[in-house]
Image: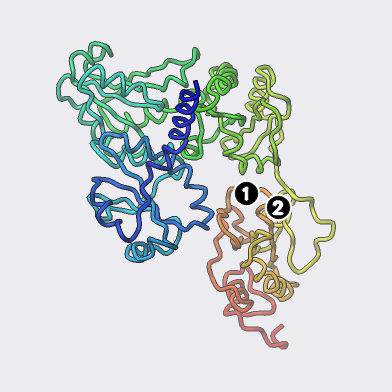
Amino acid sequence: MVWKTALLLACAWTVCQAGEKDVLELSDDDFSTRIAEHEVAVVMFYAPWCGHCKRMKPEYEKAAPTLRANDPPVILAKVDCTEAGKETCSKHGVTGYPTIKIFRNGEVSQDYSGPREADGIVKYMKSQVGPSSKELASVADFDKFTSKEEVVVVGFFKEDSDLKKAFLKLADILRERVTFGNSADEAVLKKADVNDGIVLFRPKHLANKFEPATVKYDGAANKDAIEKWINKNYHGLVGHRTRDTSKDFENPLIVAYYAVDYTKNPKGTNYWRNRILKVAKDHTDFNFAISAKDDFQHELNEFGIDFVAGDKPLVFARDAKNRKFAMKDEFSIENFETFIKDLKADKLDPYLKSEPIPDDNEGPVVVAVAKNFDEVVTKVDKDVLIEFYAPWCGHCKKLAPTFDELGEKMKGEDVSIVKMDATANDVPSTYDVRGFPTLYWVPKNNKDSPVRYESGREVNDFVEYIAKHATNELKGYDRKGKEKKKEEL
């Protein structure tokens, strides 16, 4: 009995360490020889102290055994640039961490630009090796291919045809995003009951009674039409939205956030998904998805949610205009149905993340928050220069006294200097704010077309820009930004 327990523990340890062991640890001494042994390898050049590297490490290890077992295999490796791999990292121009490169037969092929989650890494690298559409030469191949835990698209072609040509062209284009297979085997065609056609197979863990497990293409032999069909059907009525696939889901979109986990708790995950499906099937003018609350905490923060207690989903929506809406009632099929009907009837107030409107806003720099943005930027009868900042941003802190000085210089002018904390307030979709500080010039006669400010950040740079672009010439400066003499005023 003791030896059986020991054996079980040993096996458990082996399983736990499988991913780590499947990632090759290479150094200056063996990098060149070992990497040349493999047709395709991915190498992560890292530093042990790097936060991004630490976050990616478990995902990398999770992807390794799956890719090693792929046909053809893809090997994952790593090199510590701070210790045994310094020379190798220098040779390959590594200046930041992690730097990830794809090697083919020992030589660098390209930089890795795919996802950094395990599933995404696997999917991306599978698309980089072998044909864009896998040939299914037997029923066994077909059964194995369609039992994948992902959507697959299979072309069944007894002979060459225009549909087959369009299918294979599209497979080449979409190989990084969609898994394609094709077959001309008589037994496979008979089992699928398709002679010249394309079928999308949904993974078994997403099977439900509200939509078919397979969808057959019935359009023209045109790759654009096939792509449109794939996009429409790929995620089904209620898709599993991950960080890797979030861009696939367009507005108008309704997302249910809860403990989505198809690895550890598929039954519990589908318990709630099936209830969402029951309602979603009657509202196909919206896109629906489920997302793991822990993976999308940043989105929950946009709705003022710092922590999700309990098991029931939280439901949030964005309409076609990207306005945000929150379902305030506890989740139930009845409440969910009411929320969607009210949303479609425009009976709900959009959710707006906003700081309170300042009691005193008479300073040289006007403070904008989401609730007063229209008042101080869009509707004010002045040109506006607005800075979107983050309180923790060093460049923003450095700019603050300059912006205050600029505000003083623009007193009495037909120009308003404004700042907004973009981390605490919803930024209108007209403004593309991805880093801090981001500045925009908003002409008073064209508030719908703000212009990103890309000039210098000294006071004189701002004055010259404003003087040149102001709708009305400034009282204190000419069009070149030169201060006017008193007799000119």
Residue type pointed to by label 2: Phe
Direction from residue 133 to residue 84 in the image, left or right: right
- State yes or no: discs 2 and 1 in contact (Cβ < 8 Å): yes
Q: Quadrant of the C terminus?
A: bottom right
Q: Which residue is drawn at the image coordinates 24% and 20% (left, top)?
A: 156
The quarter of the picture where residue 386 lies is bottom right
Residue type pointed to by label 1: Pro
The quarter of the picture where residue 293 lies is top right
Q: Residue 173: x and y, percent?
A: 29, 39
Q: Which residue is drawn at the image coordinates 28% and 14% (left, top)?
A: 192
Name the secondary structure under disc 1. Answer: loop
Of the two numbered discs 2 and 1 on the same chain, state the one appearing first in sequence. 2
Q: Is residue 392 shown above or below 487? A: above
Q: Which mark is residue 373?
A: 2
CA gap, disc 2 and disc 1: 9 Å
Q: Residue 281: x and y, percent?
A: 53, 18
What's the coloring here?
rainbow
Q: Residue 424: x and y, percent?
A: 70, 51
Q: Is residue 282 shown above or below 34? A: above
Q: Which mark is residue 428?
A: 1
Residue 189 can be seen, yes or no: yes
Direction from residue 221 to residue 354 in the image, left or right: right
Q: Which residue is drawn at the image coordinates 46% and 21% (left, top)?
A: 205
How many numbered callouts? 2
Q: Is residue 128 shown above or below 480? A: above
Q: Residue 354: x and y, percent?
A: 73, 48
The answer to which of 79 and 15 lies nearer the viewer is 15
